[in-house]
Amino acid sequence: MHQTETFSQPTRDVGRGMLPKIKTFYLECGIGSYHIAVYNDAARPRETLAMDMIDPFGRTISYLRVSVTDRCDFRCTYCMAEDMTFLPKKDLLSLEELDRLCTVFIEKGVKKLRLTGGEPLVRKNIMHLVHQLSRHLESGALEELTLTTNGSQLSRFAAELADCGVKRINVSLDTLNAEKFHQITRWGNLAKVMEGIDAAQKAGLKIKLNAVALRDFNDAEIPELMRWAHGRGMDLTLIETMPMGEIEADRTDQYLPLSLLRAALERQFTLADIPYKTGGPARYVHVAETGGRLGFITPMTHNFCESCNRVRLTCTGTLYMCLGQEDAADLRAPLRTSEGNELLSVAIDEAIGRKPKGHDFIIDRRTSRPSVSRHMSVTGG
Ligand code: SAM
Ligand code: SF4
């Protein structure tokens, strides 16, 4: 084997910063000849350190949900009161600030990013943010950019979302009956949502439907909703209603444990558990009769916290480490205090270090107050 010190290139861009070179070698041996360079990794700038975010329970945080607005063009009865007070517009982070925050999370290991709300597609110029974030898909730093929407604005935005590299979206739809749809969303128009679903499928977006299971409202309709979704190549996921924020309705009346609904479905359909995962908390079954997938999100009857990989950012820059707890970290101050991202990165690490083990949601007749005071629209689903 022959080895000599060779070429001199003082620094090298290794993807996350210019690192000074310590030494280089030219190496010849039986299987070939090689240039070997040794760079000083200790000089890697701290704010660009690609360190995984790992919480105190050993869970790696790789999924960020961003509520880009708390506003919505619907008023779903389980989600909001009809007469909601929204945040003053001046308190919102700008789209540039949201982009900077998301980018720091991506540098720190976030691989999947979901835009949500409120209704994300009613935020002014939201497509500007989607275009900006799509650069992280192109670079490979981000594996998936997606959104959860009520579908009301999809016919306008579906093609542009697909152009930005969005591949899959979640659309919330609790009923196929136009009157009931209006009743549950208070302000929604089913025909407009259907137009949106058509446009999204035409644009090549894969859709997963989300339906909140509501006692005596849509429980009897779930088989029809499932057949319809599967017939159009869409997965359907059922969600248990969670006690978040004051609403006019009584959650005890609305709440339907999915264990009961699954048992009822099993009288008509053959459901087989499958290991399919989308990075979220749903557990899936394959439905033999329809050939489609049905998901169950069961925060109440089967807490999924042990595998939680996500944190949630609001449109004011507050980071919630758990959907079901009040503790939060302010990222707006470190974002605005300095042009560099060092302070922000430290604040994120500190917040992840406080991520709780899980939520304590309770719905029963003795517990009339919601488990957390904020509505789902603050942190998004
Ligand atoms: N507006 C968009 C939509 O409806 O898809 C995104 C935000 S919405 C808060 C996200 C999801 O949360 C929706 O699927 C909605 O049905 C669900 N959701 C809202 N309030 C809920 C609650 N209290 N319990 C369970 N799911 C809820
Ligand atoms: Fe709006 Fe979505 Fe909440 Fe319905 S569930 S009121 S669409 S934020």
Image (cartoon, rainbow, N blue to C red):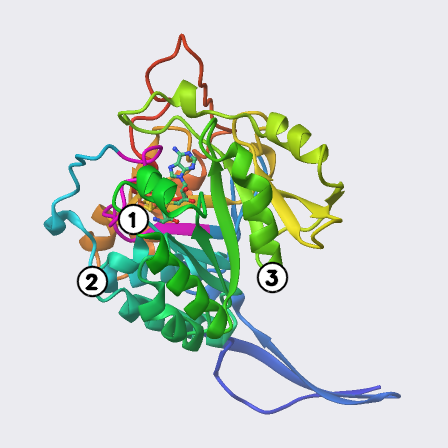
- Say if residue 297 shows up in the picture: yes
* Ligand 2 lies under 8 Å from the Cβ of mark 1: yes
Q: Nearer the viewer, mark 3 or mark 2?
A: 3
Q: Secondary structure at mark 2?
A: loop
**What residue is rendered at 68% in x and 28% in y?**
263
Question: Is 157 displayed left or right of 278 in the figure?
Answer: left
Q: Residues within 10 Å of mark 1 (few under 14, many from 20)?
A: many
Q: CA distance from mark 1 to mark 3?
A: 24 Å
Residue 220 image point, x, y percent: 54, 34
Q: Is residue 29 above or below residue 309?
A: below
Residue 27 image point, x, y percent: 75, 87
Q: Is residue 2 above or below residue 144?
A: below
Disc 1 marks which amino acid?
Answer: Gly
Label 3 with label 2: CB-CB less than 8 Å: no
Region rendered in magenta: 64-80
Of marks 1 and 3, which one's residue comes earlier in the chain?
1
Residue 39 image point, x, y percent: 55, 74
Q: Quadrant of residue 179?
A: top left
Ligand 1 in which quarter = top left
Residue 161 - label:
none
Q: Is residue 63 above or below residue 16?
A: above
**The C terminus: image quadrant:** top left
Residue 188 - label:
1
Q: Mark 2 = which residue?
A: 124
**What residue is rendered at 30% in x and 69% in y?**
127
